[in-house]
Amino acid sequence: QPLFFVMENVAEITSFERGLVKQQIIEDFAKMGYETEVKILNSANFGVPQVRKRAVFIGNRVGVQNPFPEKTHTDPRVPQTLRNTSGDAPAPYRTVYEAISDLPHLEPGQGEDETAYPLVHQLTAYQQWAREGSDSLYNHVARKHSERDRKLFRILEPGQKMIDLPKRLIPYRTDVFKDKIKKQRWDRPSSAIVAHLQKDGLM
């Protein structure tokens, strides 16, 4: 019986079974004495260089407002009137470039689980934060892309995905693998990276 609890799940849980699952969760916690709310939070709104939406339930049994965080970052392409309680406007989303442009170039199959960070003279603020307290870079390993996949990535423009390829070159079913083979943009946050068999889904 903690004073507060936090629970997260996929964003679709709020609409699953016409919202009945979400309502059941709230009612079950109410029986235990918790006033519970749920909001869809996007990690990019809190300084993470990746768009990832999750349903976050927060509940408390002390009769106060549930403490959902305020956005610290926002999509610069969308006109904003939002200001934090401090009066500051949120910063723009962090981008793929800000996050990983300092990492060494790898060919397919190259990389090590632990290696020294390369010397880079101009780091972004995010890269400075990521390196703080450590000289080691972890898990910078490239998957063994086939020559076919490398050819497809060369054809794609940043931000495009498999369905943008010429139909004769699309290697997978588009009704099942809608997010497979995607080329991230340097100037925006990454999309959520879907994993399959311990590897990314060609993203």
Image (cartoon, helix red, strand yellow):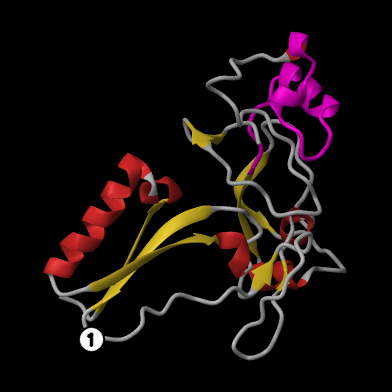
Residue closest to the eye, 87 or 183 = 87
* Residue 128 position within the rendered picture, expressed as x and y whole percent measured from the top left: 72, 72
Residue closest to the eye, 162 or 14 = 14
In this figure, what is the number of numbered marks?
1
Image: magenta residue range: 141-168
Whether 185 is among the magenta residues is no
Report which quarter residue 119 is drawn in.
Answer: bottom right
In the rendered image, the residue lying farthest to the bottom is 86
* Residue 44 position within the rendered picture, expressed as x and y whole percent measured from the top left: 62, 61
In the rendered image, the residue lying farthest to the left is 31
Rendered position, 98 above or below 73:
above
Q: Horizontal placement of 42 versus 13: left or right? A: right
Rendered position, 129 above or below 150:
below
* Residue 87 position within the rendered picture, expressed as x and y whole percent measured from the top left: 67, 89
Report which quarter residue 26 is drawn in.
Answer: bottom left
Q: Secondary structure at mark 1?
A: loop
Residue closest to the eye, 40 or 19 = 19
Q: Which residue is mark 1?
A: 62
In the rendered image, the residue lying farthest to the top is 168
Q: Horizontal placement of 86 versus 128: left or right? A: left
Residue at 81% x, 29% y is 156
Residue 100 seen in the figure: yes
Q: Horizontal placement of 10 versus 194: left or right? A: left
Q: Horizontal placement of 5 versus 184: left or right? A: left
Residue at 68% x, 58% y is 116
Q: Quadrant of the C terminus?
A: top right
The kind of residue tagged 1 is Val
Residue at 70% x, 25% y is 162
